[in-house]
Amino acid sequence: MKILHIMPHLGGGVGKALSTLVAQFTDKDYCHSFLLLELPEKSQFLDKIRELGCEVHVKPNNETVNALVNNTDIVQLEWWNHPATFQFLCTHDLPPMRLMVWCHISGLSVPIIPQKLIKASRYFLFTSACSYKAKSIISLDDINKLKLGVVSSGIGFKYSKTTKFKSQTKLRYGYMGSLNPGKIHPNFISYLYKVDISGFKVSIWGDNFYKDVLLDKCRDMSSVELVNFKGYSTNPQITLSSLDVFVYLLNPVHYGTAENVLLEAMSLGVVPVVMNNEAEMEIVRHGETGLIVSDENEFSDAINWLESNPKDREKMSKNAIIDIGKNYSTNKMFEDMSSYYERSIKYLKQEIDFCDAFGNDPYEWYYVSQEHNDIVIKSYNNELNEITKGSLRHYLNYFPNNSKLKAIVKI
């Protein structure tokens, strides 16, 4: 069975998920190939996929695109609201296909999941069950709800009986992940500031692009000592293993789903403290595998509790290792995904009019992933400092001469 993955790039969590997925199929009767719409900025996961024997085509011409789609059994669209994806789908006259979508956004807030994309697909797979609570999914008709399923794109590190509870006298706190304002909690520093423990500090691993924003907030509170920026980690397993508590405070309207780094931390016995966001609550069981908080006071209380209750913290640590090992393994990802491949192959290929689903203009492509009210206000407030992740600025970088997109900025 031939599977063609179409996606903008192989960066970050998506790159890890797909390289992990493909590795499970190497000795089986499946052949995976990749069509990338952008030149990769980082080659870490691209190199892994090539090492596994997969063909990778970067920005191929129209003739190659048509040949790839014609000669594949299933087209797996790796979905998030990237401008390159819309441009590709709506400007190519693609051959008939069996379309399966793996959705890498939650749809709980902006960007939303376009209903017409679900209707155009044979199966539409979420990376977390939290997406069932999205407005556009709840209002979907019953027939198209039958196309929905869940295959987690997140996995922990392999469970090891040698993983032991870290009985440090001074707990080590850390955060790893994106620092952009669409992901990390806007009051992240304020939450840390609320903790009244001598020497409390959180080590932070991530791209340094938004580092100064967080540092400025620390300076405003005269608390630069609260954080220690470590840069981008190329070996998260070793990095996360050095921690006792994972301070994973995300924006209430963040776009994430499977939260791979959270799974990785928990699989190593690092106890998480997370916000009461749907994606995180799908993973963390409060009081059993971690702690869930809703405000600064609850966060401060949670940290104090972890400091004061080492035996309960140890129990949470062990529970987290077992829970992630059971529910987020590479074998489970393979079994879940292959079951949808076997179902999809039974159907005939069909022609899909992506312009009907998304429109013909970049403004329409941007708009279809927005909530259909207060679009200008939402864009201004939530995306002013965001330059990628399907933001307004991201679309303007792709389509700088689009008058309708420029009109939003002017307003």
Image (spheres, rainbow, N blue to C red):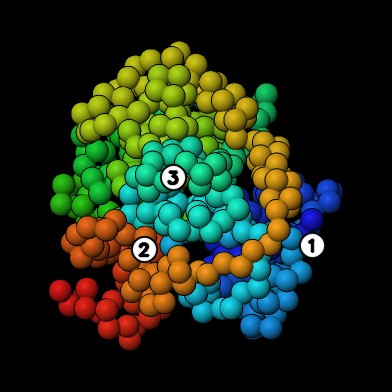
- Distance from the alpha carbon under mark 3 to that under mark 1: 40 Å
Q: Are marks 2 and 1 in contact (CB under 8 Å)?
A: no
| Amino acid at circle 3 | Asp
Q: Which residue is mark 1?
A: 53
- Distance from the alpha carbon under mark 3 to that under mark 2: 18 Å
> What residue appears at the point 44 percent right and 29 percent down from the top-left corner?
284
| Amino acid at circle 1 | Gly
| Amino acid at circle 2 | Val
| Left-right relation of 341 to 408 | right
Of circles 3 and 1, the one toward us is 3
> What residue appears at the point 33 percent right and 74 percent down from the top-left corner?
363
Q: Which residue is mark 3?
A: 141
Q: Position of residue 130 (x, y in %)?
A: 43, 38
Is the residue 158 above or below the residue 11 in the image? above
| Left-right relation of 410 to 89 | left
Is the residue 277 above or below the residue 90 in the image? above
Q: Secondary structure at mark 2?
A: loop
Q: Which residue is mark 2?
A: 368
> What residue appears at the point 69 percent right and 50 percent down from the top-left corner?
344
> What residue appears at the point 38 percent right and 41 percent down from the top-left corner?
138
Q: Quadrant of residue 189?
A: top left
Q: Secondary structure at mark 1?
A: loop
Residue situated in front as seen by the camera: 297 or 64: 64
Residue situated in front as seen by the camera: 219 or 152: 152
